[in-house]
Image (spheres, rainbow, N blue to C red):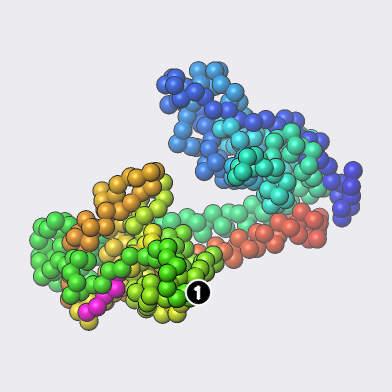
């Protein structure tokens, strides 16, 4: 037994009563599913697991290796996506590759064990042994021997849990604010693209069109109109001409309409290819291929600044406005709305498990066309909402950074909680 900051450290197996794998019932027996026993997959794992979308029947539990874990069991993924940790707040079963861990409450608080495993998850990933060429896992039996847990007194554990719970609640609150603001944005988008900008509504009537009701004085346009838009497909492989180094935006490099530059790859491409596929301020990128069979494509991103030596992959296409009658951000906002309401889903086809947008149909979908001042007003309203979301996301990121810092300092005893009263 090793001592750290006067706290004993014990192997995981010494502080728990039970650990075990989950199980997967046979899909050939329909009675196994649609019951009332929650059955947890990787995507269901979070701090408090109350509900899932999948349920087993008692027959499914009886005729499989799945186990029923009681409330307050720690749920830990050790295969595929390693290191996700949660706490069962109802009796539930776990899928294969997801362990249930029951703490010995005489020596360790189950929530303290949860936070300990959260802190150790990175180390646990590094311990995982390879399975084949790509899959990795670390079996529960090895977890019990390799994972070390610091063990302060139970009263100290409870104080640490209270502090971390307080920060976690702040993170959860920020998540709720962000999600509610996003829902509000969807509602406002539907309102704006039906009734128009608030400054232009007085005395206005609506008309029925292929895209639903829109203001009577609006027209419709199409991306296929070459007088208004220039469309360009993404880079393709080629090594025939002179080469240059270019950073290539992929469909994994944007989220919520914004580019994420953290993992943009740089590759060598033909100079001639790049000249046709540069990125300028006010360009719009649209995802036309990618994802799995159940994942819609058609997400869009807006280019806020010129990006020298940046291009885009063949999973994307570029839309460039070439007339001063159109405010580019308005087109981006409408295409985002079209995607959000599921418009692209009906324009997709499945090939080899990948979703592809039928771009020839997409560019012939009508786009509402108000006056330039109204386009600008609508785009600016939605930009204001996005700025609100971004502010809340930054607050959440600060809380998450505080959580990481406090997790390490509390778990190592660097912060003394003995004199803190709750």
Q: Nearer the viewer, residue 127 or 358?
A: 358
* Residue beneath the point at 50% across and 56% down: 175
Report crowding for label 1: few under 14, some 14 to 19, many 20 or more residues within 10 A (C-alpha). some
- Let me know if residue 46 appears in the view: yes
- Let me know if residue 112 appears in the view: no
- Label 1: state its secondary structure: strand
Q: Nearer the viewer, residue 270 or 181?
A: 270
Looking at the rendering, the stretch of residues picked out in magenta corresponds to 319-323
Q: What residue is shown with label 1?
A: 245
| Number of callouts | 1
* Residue beneath the point at 51% across and 68% down: 267
Question: Percent position (x, y) of residue 327?
Answer: 26, 76
Q: Is residue 149 left or right of residue 335?
A: right
Does 109 sit above or below residue 203? above
* Residue beneath the point at 46% across and 25% down: 27
Q: Assign the N terminus to one quadrant of the image.
A: top right
Q: Nearer the viewer, residue 357 or 93?
A: 357
């Amino acid at each position: 037994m090793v001592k750290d900051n006067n706290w004993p450290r014990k192997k995981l197996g010494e502080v728990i009563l039970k650990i075990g794998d989950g199980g997967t019932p046979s899909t050939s027996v329909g009675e196994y599913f649609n019951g009332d026993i929650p059955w947890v997959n990787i995507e269901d794992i979070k701090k408090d697991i109350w509900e899932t979308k999948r349920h087993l029947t008692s027959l499914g539990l009886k005729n499989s290796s799945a186990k029923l874990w009681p409330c307050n069991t720690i749920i830990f993924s050790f295969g595929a996506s390693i290191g996700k940790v949660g706490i069962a707040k109802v009796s539930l079963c776990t899928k294969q590759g997801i362990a249930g861990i029951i703490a010995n409450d005489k020596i360790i608080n189950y929530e303290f064990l949860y936070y300990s495993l959260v802190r150790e998850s990175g180390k646990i990933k590094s311990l995982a042994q390879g399975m084949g060429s790509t899959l990795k896992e670390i079996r529960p039996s090895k977890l019990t021997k390799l994972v070390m847990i610091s063990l302060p007194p139970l009263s100290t554990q409870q104080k640490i849990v209270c502090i971390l719970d307080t920060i976690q609640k702040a993170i959860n609150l920020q998540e709720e604010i962000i999600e509610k603001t996003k829902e509000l944005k969807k509602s406002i988008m539907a309102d704006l693209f039906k009734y128009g900008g608030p400054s232009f509504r007085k005395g206005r009537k609506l008309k029925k069109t292929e895209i639903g009701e829109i203001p009577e004085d609006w027209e419709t346009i199409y991306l296929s109109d070459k007088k208004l838009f220039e469309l360009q497909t993404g880079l393709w492989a080629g090594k025939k001409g002179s080469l240059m180094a270019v950073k290539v935006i992929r469909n994994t490099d944007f989220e919520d309409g914004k580019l994420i530059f953290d993992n943009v790859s740089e590759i060598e491409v033909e100079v001639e290819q790049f000249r046709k596929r540069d990125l300028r301020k006010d360009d719009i990128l649209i995802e036309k291929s990618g994802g799995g069979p159940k994942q819609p494509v058609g997400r869009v991103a807006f280019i806020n600044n010129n990006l020298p030596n940046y291009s885009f992959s063949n999973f994307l296409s570029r839309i460039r406005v070439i007339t001063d009658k159109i405010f580019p951000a308005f087109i981006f906002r409408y295409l985002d709305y079209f995607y959000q309401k599921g418009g692209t889903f009906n324009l997709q086809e499945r090939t080899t498990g990948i979703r592809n947008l039928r771009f020839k149909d997409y560019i012939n979908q009508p786009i509402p066309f108000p006056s330039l001042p109204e386009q600008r007003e609508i785009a600016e309203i939605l930009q204001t909402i996005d700025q609100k979301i971004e502010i809340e996301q930054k607050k959440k990121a600060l809380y998450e950074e505080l959580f990481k810092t406090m997790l390490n300092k509390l778990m190592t005893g660097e912060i003394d909680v003995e004199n803190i009263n709750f």
